[in-house]
Amino acid sequence: MYEVDFAEFPSASATASGQFFERAFGWRVTPYGPDYTDVRAAGLTFGFQSDAAERPSAPLITIRTDDLPAAREAVVAAGGEVTKEPFSFPGGRRFHFREPGGSELAVWCPAE
């Protein structure tokens, strides 16, 4: 199973981004410290990263899977380049990759 269910955005202030979407649309906000906030809306979660060392340079679309090692193998076999090896984060594990056209995406698996 592979489905897009998350997009991460760079933010000058993760707190301000979360507060905006909560006030504007009533979406549920979960802060994970001062530099990261999740905003949940209609089956999709938006993450806002303000830590300069971790902030993506562009929106990062994230694909959910139940088998992270198999997804990594499939990405490499299809010609993708792994740009960040699998790592843990609150909620699960993920890796980043660049597809042959140059866009960076990520694949994640929830914590068991």
Image (tube, rainbow, N blue to C red):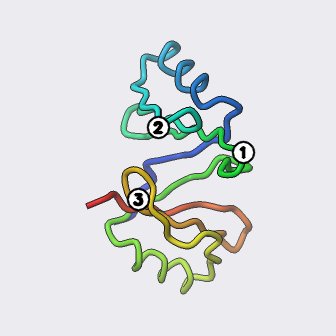
At 51% from the left edge and 39% from the top edge, which residue is drawn? 46
Q: Which amino acid type is shown beneath numbered disc 3?
A: Arg
Mark 2 and mark 3 in contact (Cβ < 8 Å)?
no
Give the quadrant of the C terminus: bottom left
> What is the x, y in percent for residue 15?
57, 26
Q: Callout 3: helix, strand or loop? A: strand
- The residue singled out by tag 2 in the image is 32
Q: Label 1: how many residues lie within 10 Å, few (<14), some (14-19) or many (20+)?
A: few
Instruction: Tally the numbered discs.
Output: 3
Q: Which amino acid type is shown beneath numbered disc 1?
A: Ala
Q: Which mark is residue 64?
A: 3
Sequence order check: which comes first, mark 1 or mark 2?
Answer: 2
At 38% from the left edge and 62% from the top edge, which residue is drawn? 109
Classify residue 7 as left or right of residue 9. left
Residue at mark 3 to residue at mark 2: CA–CA distance: 20 Å
Q: Which amino acid type is shown beneath numbered disc 2?
A: Tyr
- The residue singled out by tag 1 in the image is 52
Classify residue 1 as left or right of residue 74. left
Q: Callout 2: helix, strand or loop? A: loop
Q: Quadrant of residue 66?
A: bottom left
